[in-house]
Image (spheres, rainbow, N blue to C red):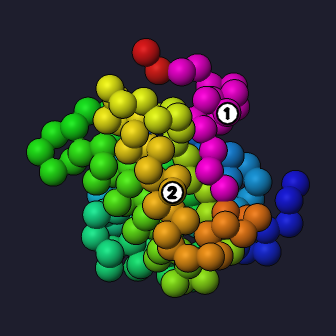
Amino acid sequence: MVATNGRTVTVFGGTGFLGRRIIRHLRYREFSVRIASRHPDRGHRLFGPDDPQLQSVEADVHDERSVADALAGAYGVVNAVSLYLERGQETFHSVHVEAAQRVAAQAQRAGVERLVHVSDRTTRFSPPSSSSFASFQSIRCSAAAGPDCNRPMWKMLRKRLLESWGEPRHP
């Protein structure tokens, strides 16, 4: 086991398909986890209310203050928020670029030591696919949070790498 020294990791998108697996992995490694979700009751339903090292908080990656509050005192952050279908204001650009940039910028301001941005989209530019292009931009936009964003402990992972944790992919 890893010695976590009571460090808290905030997981945005923690109630989603991949986020749930990330939270289970972090808890297995004995990290305290703050599940940041627009629907904090889902965190309680998914993981139960009995684990004192799990906290569900209301947060919206589109809201600067909400993101800052969710990151307060966190050692690390995982951005596992994803969008599969655009609807109204929820666009690939708003989620995969603007929200990713917001999380990275707020993490830097909060002094977060570890940041992982998970993307389920290709990182290669693909003109016909606005979602692929948005994810490509999110990598570049995360760097806009400042020079510390390029430090060794701030990483971008592709979703496929994380799906090898023994869980089947959803259809």
Q: Vertically, is 75 above or below 115?
A: below
Using a 10 Å C-alpha cutoff, classify the residue at mark 2 as few (fewer than 14 neighbours), some (14 to 19) or many (20 or more): some
* Label 1 Cα neighbours within 10 Å, binned few <14 / some 14-19 / many ≥20: few
Q: Nearer the viewer, residue 29 or 66?
A: 66
**In the orientation shown, which residue stands out farthest toward the left?**
88
Task: Depth check: give the residue in front, 74 or 150.
Answer: 150
Residue stretch in magenta = 155-169
- For the point 49% across and 69% down, which residue is it? 144
Q: Image quadrant for the C terminus?
A: top left
Give yes or no for contact between labels 2 and 1 (Cβ–Cβ under 8 Å): no
Can residue 80 be found in the magenta stretch? Answer: no
Mark 1 residue type: Leu
- Tag 2: amino acid: Arg
Q: Going 40% across and 39% down the picture, which residue do you hit?
A: 133
Residue 63 drawn at (x, y percent): 28, 70
Whether residue 32 sits left or right of residue 11 in the image: it is right
Rendered location of residue 57, percent (x, y): 39, 67
Mark linked to residue 140: 2
Task: Say which element carries label 2.
Answer: helix
Mark 2 and mark 1: span between their CA atoms? 20 Å
Identity of the residue drawn at 38% across and 44% down = 134
| Quarter holding residue 68 | bottom left
In the image, 135: left or right of 148? left
Q: Is residue 16 above or below residue 32?
A: above
First in sequence, mark 2 or 1: give its number.
Answer: 2
List x then y, in percent, for residue 5: 79, 75
Would you identify the image quadrant in which residue 169 lies? Answer: top right
Q: Quadrant of the N terminus?
A: bottom right
Q: Circle 1 sits on which residue?
A: 161
